[in-house]
Image: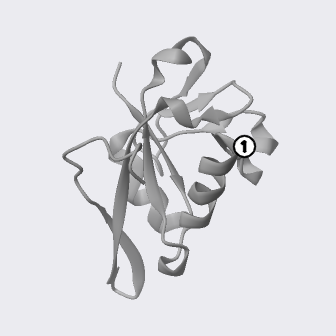
Amino acid sequence: MRNLYRIVKADTWKEAKEIGHIPRCGNDERRNRIHLNVHEAVEYVAAKYYVPDEQPLAIEFDTSSFLENIEWLEPTDELPWKQPLVDIPNLPIHAVVAIHQLDPGLVDGKNTYKLRKVTQDTARHS
């Protein structure tokens, strides 16, 4: 199984390190599932929901501890990739394998992000 990603504000990541899990967002509460992203979706989702001042991060998860709790939504016209939803109370930070910076940009007046490659496990060092 490939790893999945959760995009969060830098402040949310700081909170997560203190409490041991990533808090749910409003969309998670409405669906009663936690939204994750495949690698292909990270930059799109970051640009759609976050502004540069929020300093979004892409948190990479090893899903092996909750693999059986993942529900896969089929691709849509807007989102041409499968969308994973996880039925667990919270995303534990012990499952984090890397923290990826998202480099902001601007194209035609719209926010964009580029996922920065990580060459080592930065989860324990951030």
In this rendering, the count of numbered labels is: 1
- Work out which residue is located at the far left of the displayed protein and give it: 119
Q: Hey, what amino acid is under mark 1?
A: Asp
The secondary structure type at the circle numbered 1 is helix
Q: Tell me residue 58's x, y (percent).
A: 43, 52
Where the C terminus falls, by quadrant? bottom left
Left or right, 116 with reference to 27: left
Left or right of 15? Residue 120 is left
Viewer-nearest residue: 17 or 41 = 17
Residue that sits furthest to the bottom in the current view? 109
**Residue 125 at x, y = what percent?**
38, 50
Location of residue 85 by image quarter: top right
Q: How is the image coloured?
A: one colour
Q: Residue furthest top?
A: 68
Seen at 47% across and 23% down, the residue is 63
- Identified at 57% across, 21% down, the residue is 70
Choose between 120 and 45: the one closer to the eye. Answer: 120
Residue in view at x 34 percent, y 42 percent: 39
Decide: is 106 above or below 7. Answer: below
Q: Quadrant of residue 80?
A: top left
Residue for point 54% across, 69% down: 50
Between residues 111 and 10, which one lies in front from this camera angle?
10
The x, y position of residue 76, in whole percent, is: 49, 41
Q: Determine crowd level at label 1: few under 14, some 14-19, many 20+ residues with C-alpha closer than 10 A.
A: some
Quarter of the figure with residue 115: bottom left
Q: Which residue occupies the foreground of this view, 122 or 89?
A: 122
The quadrant of the rendering that contains the N terminus is top left
Name the residue beneath numbered marker 1: 28
